[in-house]
Amino acid sequence: MSAHVEAAHEHHGPPQAHQSSRVDSRVLGMFLFIASEAMLFGSFFAAYFFVRVVNPDAPAEWPPEPYHFPVFVAGVNTAILVTSSFTMHWALQSIKRGQRPAFLAGMVLTFLMGLAFLLTQAIEYLHVGFNTSDGAFASVFFGLTGLHGAHVAVGLTLLGMVTVRGFRGHYSPEHHHGVELPGIYWHFVDIMWIVVYSTVYLV
Amino acid sequence: MESPFKSEAAAFRLLLITIGAFALIVAAAWIDPWLGVAVWLVLTAAAVWVYMRQRGPRPPQEHVEHVGPPDVRRVLVVANETVGGEELMSAIGELALSAKTEFMVVCPALNSRLKTWTSDEDPARAEAQRRLDATLARLSSVGIEARGEVGDVDPLLAIEDAVRLHHPDEIVISTHPEGRSNWLERGVVDAARERPDRDSRGGESRAGVWSRRCRRVIGR
């Protein structure tokens, strides 16, 4: 009894948080984070559609003459990024089945493809032929693609950490939450790129 | 409906759907920009329709998988103001005599709506904990071992939490008599009997058994 009282007196700080069993708190955290990210992208898309559609001075051509978007290069980049989602999914499925070599191969491939996407985008910026001072269209182009690029950089950091931890023997069929959460984020980044590429480059 | 970002597999599925949807939109927009808008509207409406269709309640689950030793029955007892009452104690005693039973007592931390909205829950939780401790001590004094915890402010959510965490074979909900019972007025017992749900792992929840295994004790 006295031990119990002593233990109770040793506790400092707020009481233990009460949480629902409906959803894991870490998944809920990632879900709320992605929801806020979706709203951030939404504000950038609002600016894009305003410049392109609502604005009375919107250019008839998109992008306005004499500029061109590198649609083909961005298309190849899209293929790379989408493929990286497949390898990410493969990596997670592999660790769930206890296939460590396949998991590591999937993580390395995903990381390399994400890195290739980011480097290709940087090269695209250098050769695109306009910059933010060339008009609102250029600002929204760099704003949207740059925002997405920043998310890819964050995703790459997460993937890098998972890969390093994977090579150090972390994760198992029972404990792979650290792979699952970056995987959710990576797919979200891919989904946003599909929307960005379709609306900015193609339509 | 399952959240599209609840798991990596769900997010991957959403990615595939997004690729297909935007391929259609872009192809339509190349034919005619307004056709692209129309396809986007149709796909959005279809997504809303699927969402609304999947929101409805699922039929109650008929089969209950027993968790734990085969000869031990698990009973969840949900009560608050009637938690130490004679009627509930008597019902627990009957259950304890009829078979080897593990009891889990949950006291929802009942609170006013305003206090819940302002996160002023500590007094309600302390009061629920006091009742729970007294009840567990009383059960222990008559030789019935039980565990207990303070549940969510919402009694239905408290039941759902306990069902998912403790996998009971049977649920006993103790309420005041009709006319005095706030839970009966709010339809908590009926909702608990009818309400199926999904557990946090995505499988069918044991909550679906409530339609067969949920009983009410009228306390004082």
Image (cartoon, rainbow, N blue to C red):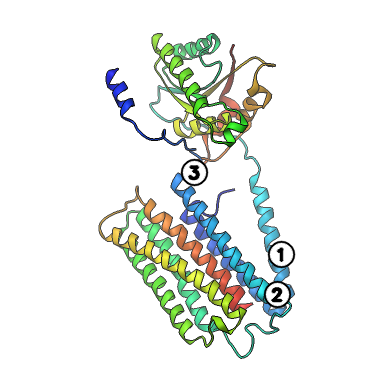
Rendering coords of residue B21 (x, y %)? 62, 66
Residue A160 sits in quarter: bottom left
The C terminus of chain A sits in image quarter: bottom right
The residue type indicated by label 1 comes to Leu
**In the foreground, B61 or B186:** B186
Q: Left or right: where does residue A64 sit relative to residue A129?
A: right
Q: Look at the picture and state if B162 lies above or below B24.
A: above
Q: Chain of mark 3?
A: A
Residue at the location (58% across, 63% down)?
B17
Q: Look at the picture and state if B68 lies above or below B216.
A: below
Which of the marked residues, 2 or 3, is nearer the chain's N terminus? 3
Q: Left or right: where does residue A53 sit relative to residue B216?
A: right
**In the foreground, B47 or A55:** A55
Rendering coords of residue B7 (x, y %)? 48, 52
Q: Is residue B99 visible?
A: no
Rendering coords of residue B11 (x, y %)? 51, 58
Q: Answer yes or no: are tags 2 and 1 on the same subunit.
A: no
Calculate the distance from the C-alpha at mark 2 to the C-alpha at mark 1: 17 Å
Rendering coords of residue B203 (x, y %)? 50, 42
Residue at the location (60% across, 63% down)?
A42
The mark found on residue B41 in the picture is 1
Q: Which residue is mark 2?
A: A53
